[in-house]
Each structure stands twice: as structure tokens, then as C-alpha cells.
Image (cartoon, grey):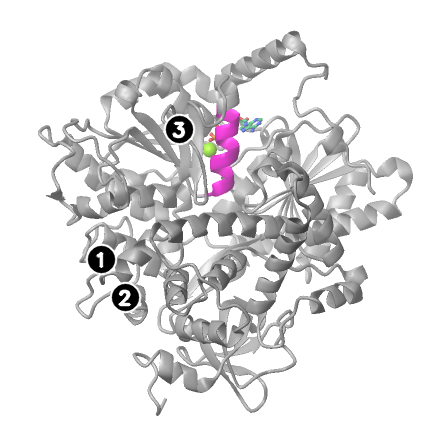
Amino acid sequence: GEPNPANRAPSTSLPSTDGGSTGSLSRRQLIAQRRKSLPIADVEKRLVEEVRKHDTLIIVGETGSGKTTQIPQYLWNAEFCHDGKTIGVTQPRRVAAVTVSKRVAEECGVELGKQVGYSIRFDDMTSGLTRIKYMTDGLLLREALLDPYLSRYSVIIVDEAHERTVHTDVLLGLLKDVQKARSKSNCTADNSNIQLGNGIIFNKELGNSGGFKQQNSQKVLPLKVIIMSASLDARVFSDYFGGARAVHIQGRQFLVEILYTLHPQPDYLDSALITIFQIHLEEAPGDVLVFLTGQEEIESVERLIQERLRELPEGKRNVLTVPIFSSLPSEQQMRVFAATPPGFRKVILATNIAETSVTIPGIKYVVDPGFVKARSYDPVKGIESLIVIPTSKAQALQRSGRAGREGPGKCFRLYPESEFEKLEASTMPEIKRCNLSNVILQLKALGVDDVTGFDFIEKPPRASIVKSLEQLFLLGALTEDCKLSHPLGHQMARLPLDPIYSKALIQASQFNCLVEMLITVAMLSVESIFYAPAEKLDEARTAMKGFSSPDSDHITLINVFRAAEEFLEKRTGINKGKDEKILKKWCKENFINSRSLRHARDIHRQIKGHVGQMGLQISSCGEDMLQYRRCLAASFFLNAALRQPEGSYRALASGQVVQIHPSSILFRAKPDCIIFNELVQTNNKYIRSITRIDYLWLTELAPQYYTMEK
Ligand code: ADP
Ligand code: MG
């Protein structure tokens, strides 16, 4: 196949590649030198003093100044980890938690998972030794269910707060309460129920049922909260924390020349591709960072670049493409940080994760099509979807800033300058545009019964709260008076999944098809299992037929998962590392996206562990797929749709008219009644992940929602 220089290149930025002690010594020196030269290093002492003086501190600093990697280390050195306590750092994105913790472990000269580690959903790399722990904001919220005082932490750093993810927003509210509770001098961890200012009743019972043991008589010390943000607007956080102190860290930024297109671009991917090659062929050396909206786009652009490279003369093919997105296996994520091999130009294809969460060295050119994938919620219809929308001005500025970290750079915005002026100033906080069922379920589990009364940094729309409460009630998680139901609501709150998927798993244990549903939920949690490159469309279609079930995309996904397992089972006695390689080959032959399948297999293992701990009956329906489809209907009845005379579908819950996505098995068959799992909006409203059901099952299996007349 293709020569892949990344695999052969040394993963260090040292000029010499020979190992040995001198090599590793100089790498350490190099790291020490890099750390000292970061803008933040000059203010280490002052920062530590500020943290000592103030229980809540807001730190604003330009991206790349060293906030995320350095501040936790400064605090560790300044003994903020007294009595075995941990410094927790939350990130909105999994990739950031993983890559940053790896970097920091290396800077500290410790093995990842020992003193420095990370913990994200489905992947925990921490131990009792861990003193600096990077994690997603969502994960810390879940930890609060088991450890209401967050008693193992002396400091919590909420990083990337400007992103304003729904989890960050809820976490801020929670931290405010925990801080209040912990600052009360007589507070010990063995009170079973405490009532906090915000109305949270921390319920220790729930925590203990999760197997968590609290150190009983141990005194809980005050909690330091640090909020870090890349945007200059610290006011909103400061106000929220009662006028908390904010400090600014000066960054270093070189001039970035901004270039716009003359005309709007009809196809931004094509336009990105042209720009990448224009940079490669006409501009001075330097790496390129391209902002795309998701895995699918990244992988298709990556293929197109490879194709066009083959058309170039031998001497001009020195381009190395490196993707980075959240579901990329973690060791592949680190490839973006590897030094570009001499004579090569690295083209990094990233989601907006590279906007502020991770800083990649060596970037001189940024290609910004000006789009981002975002959650959007229609509270009236109760439908959440992912849509591709224009970035905000703040995002565009952050993106172009990435080109000027180490020297002057250029940013190619793939839209006319007049369009820039029309962009929103900043992105709307996620809490205002997402389904809140998940968050409400967690707040309820934390004892916050009055969700509307919760002290949010910014209130979500009342209609969203009402709709989400209604959905939780329909799923059986809440009782009629909006309390968490027993046992269903409590069980659902324990699973780290969307409530609708948690419900499906619990439901499946009653339908004797939990084996199948575990696979389903895992496969639905990843993007695009199948891939069909344009030049091999027919082959890909034939390969897909081999797995397909006439009734169901869900069953088709199960077939893929099982085929992979069977394939691996046949090869006994081969070690795991080798397995991955063989599986990759198998995926390639079958036009399966190996990264996605691998991710799904990981998720499967983890959720299986969770449901096992919960004591659910893990049994299989065997050949009886009717039973499984009935279970899908019982679980996803909120996403049922009926065929219209002209071939489109009407979603029963929302009344919305939708189309079956061409990638669905049922695109041609168009059955009368279906359930679906995904709604994507482009020009059309498309539904994906579809299974044929019988209309009558809805009234039989979800009578709380469907009556005969409906
Ligand atoms: P901030 O949080 O202020 O945006 P970071 O602490 O993330 O800044 O980054 C500080 C510096 O560390 C940057 O110059 C970045 O390039 C570098 N860095 C971060 N992670 C890695 C890594 N895995 N490998 C090499 N350099 C890294
Ligand atoms: Mg950072």
C-alpha cells in the first residue's frame, strides 16, 4: 500500500532518533525548556498566590498560553494535593482530556494513569495514586451522584468554560453548591442528607448503592474552584460566582493574514480541498489545519486528498494527512502532535476540537470553511437534531488565531468578507438548544426536584424543561408528580447513556433480548459504521448486502458486530494487538469503518459491565428477531413514524414530515410503520437507523402514549 511516513517517523521532536539514556535525557530537557518558554510560566508564582487567596478564581488566557497543561502542575507543586486529594480538571471534549493528560504525564515524567491520569465515559485511566485527573465535565457530574461533596478533590478546574456545554453549565451550578457546603466548617462527609442553598439534597443512599464507600469521619476541606476560559468575557462567570476574581494571562500571538473568497462557495468541501492543494503547491513550508464538521467529512476529505496526491508528480506528494475527532482511538489522536517528518507538510483535518481545546504545534495555515456541527432542539416538537451551522465570529477568530502561535500565518476563510460581518458574535450556550432529559434525570438523581428553580448560569427555555420532563415521564423515569420513579428512574440515572437508550436496555432485559440491545446501543453510539468510497460504490454496496436484514438497520448493525466477533473467534490463541490488525483488514475487505467498529466494541464492553453490575438479565432472543423488533418499538415509541401516500413519513410524536435517508436499508422498501433513532437536517429532514414495526405494537406496547384512535 501507500508508504505512511507517520508510522515510521520518530514520535519525538528530537533530531536524533536513537534511543538510549542520552536521548531521553535531552527530550526531558527539551520539555523543560518548552514549559519555561510558555507565556504562563512567568506568572506561576502569582497564579498560585491567587488560588491560595481566592476560593473561586476565573482565569482567562489565550489558547496555547499553557493554562490546561501547566496550571494543574503548578498547583500540584504548590501542595494543593494535601492529604491525598486530587486536582480535577474538566474538559468539554474527550479528546482533550486524553491528549492533555498524556502530555502532562510526560512533562511530569510519570506513567499515564499513575499520578496523572484521565477519566472519560467508557475509559478510565486513573488509580489511587492519581493527583491530577483530567476528565470530561459530564463524567464529573456522574461522579457527583456517588460522591456528592466531590470529597476526593481539593481543586476543581472547569476548563474551556467559554464553550458553555450543557454539562459545563450544570457543573458550575453544582460546584457552587458543593463549595458552599464544604466551606461550612463543621461539615463532615457522614451526614446522610444535607440541604444546600440551591435546593440540592445530596442523597447519600444513592451513592452507596453504587458501591461507593465514603471515608466516614473525614473532614471535608473547602473546595477551590477555578474557571478557565479562552474568551475575554469573564464577567458572566464572575457575576455568577458572586463577583469572583478574574485574572488575565497575556498570550503570544503573531500576525495572521485573513483571506476571504470573492464569492460564496457552493460546496465547502470541494473548496477546502482546492485551498489545501493551493497552499501545498504555492505557499512556504508549514503545517495546515483544516476545520471540518465531523468524522464522516474528515474521512472523505482525507480520501480525496490521497486521491489527488496520486495525480501529482512524485516530488509533490509530500503531504501527510492526520485526522483528529472525538471518536478516534486514543493512540491515533496523539499522532497530530508528532513532529512532521522532514520534507513533509502535515495537513490536520480536525473538528472544532482544534479551535481551543487542543493546541497543535507547527500550524502556519488555517483553512476555515466556516461551519460547525451543533445540537439543535425544537422544544415544541421535542426533537433534537445535529445540524451544520455557520460558526460565530468568536469561533472564526479562535480558528484563525491557531495560525499565529509560533510565527506569522495565514487563514483562508472559505466565504466572502461580507458573510463574516453577518455571523453571530458568539455561540449560543448549548443548554438553550438541546434536549434536557439527560440533565434533568441527573439533577433529579442529585435530589434537585425543582429543576426550574435550579440556579443555572443561564436558564434553559421553560418549554425545553417541560418537554423533557414529559419525555422522562413517558419513558417511565418520572412519576406523575415528577419524582424519580422506583426502580426504573433510578436505574436509568445510573447508566451513562441517553435516557432513551437506558430505557431500551432495561426494557430489553424484560424482552429477553438484552444481548441484542447492548450491541444496538453500542453501534448507535458511533458515527458511520459503513463506508462507501465513491470509486468503489458497487463493491461497497455488495459488501453491505451481505450483512443486511430486510426489516431493519438495527439488525443489520447487529449482523456486522456479530460477523466481526465470529471472525475473531475463529482465530484462537492470537494476542489482542494482532487481533486489532486482523480486524482492520477484515473491515477494509467488508467496507466497514474500522475506527467506528472498534469504538463500538469498546462501548459495548463497557455498557455490558454497567448492566451486569445493575443485575439485569443478559439473555438473547436467539433467532426470534420479531421479539427484538417488538422491543425496539416498546423502547423507541417516541420515534415512530407512519408512511404518507407520497412516500415521505410523518413522525407521530412531532407531526414532522421526514424522509428515509438513502443510506438506510429501508430506503426503497418504505414500510408502513417504522421507528428511527436519528434525525439529520440538511436541505431535507432525514431519518436514519430505522426498523420496520407493526403499527398495532405501538398501542399494545406503549399504551401510555398511543391509544387506538391516534
Ligand atoms: P491552553 O490551555 O492555554 O490553550 P495548553 O496548556 O493546552 O494551552 O498548551 C500549552 C502548550 O503545550 C501549547 O504550545 C501546545 O502546543 C503544547 N502541547 C499541548 N499538548 C501537547 C502534546 N501532546 N504534544 C506536544 N505539545 C503539546
Ligand atoms: Mg486549554
Between the residue at mark 1 and the residue at mark 3, the CA separation in whole angstroms equals: 34 Å
Q: Nearer the viewer, residue 20 or 516?
A: 516
Residue 372 place in picture, x, y as percent = 54, 53
Q: Choose mark 2 or mark 3, whichever is in front.
A: 3
Secondary structure state at the residue bearing disc 3: loop
Residue 528 in view: no
Secondary structure state at the residue bearing disc 2: helix
- Which residue is the extreme one toward the right? 313
Q: Is residue 694 magenta?
A: no
Q: Choose mark 1 or mark 3, whichever is in front.
A: 3
Query: Which span of residues is magenta-colored?
Result: 93-104
Residue 176 place in picture, x, y as percent = 22, 40
Between the residue at mark 2 and the residue at mark 1, the CA separation in whole angstroms equals: 10 Å
The answer to which image quadrant residue 43 occupies is top left
Give the residue type at disc 1. Answer: Val
Which mark is drawn over residue 127?
Answer: 3
Which mark is drawn over residue 420?
Answer: none
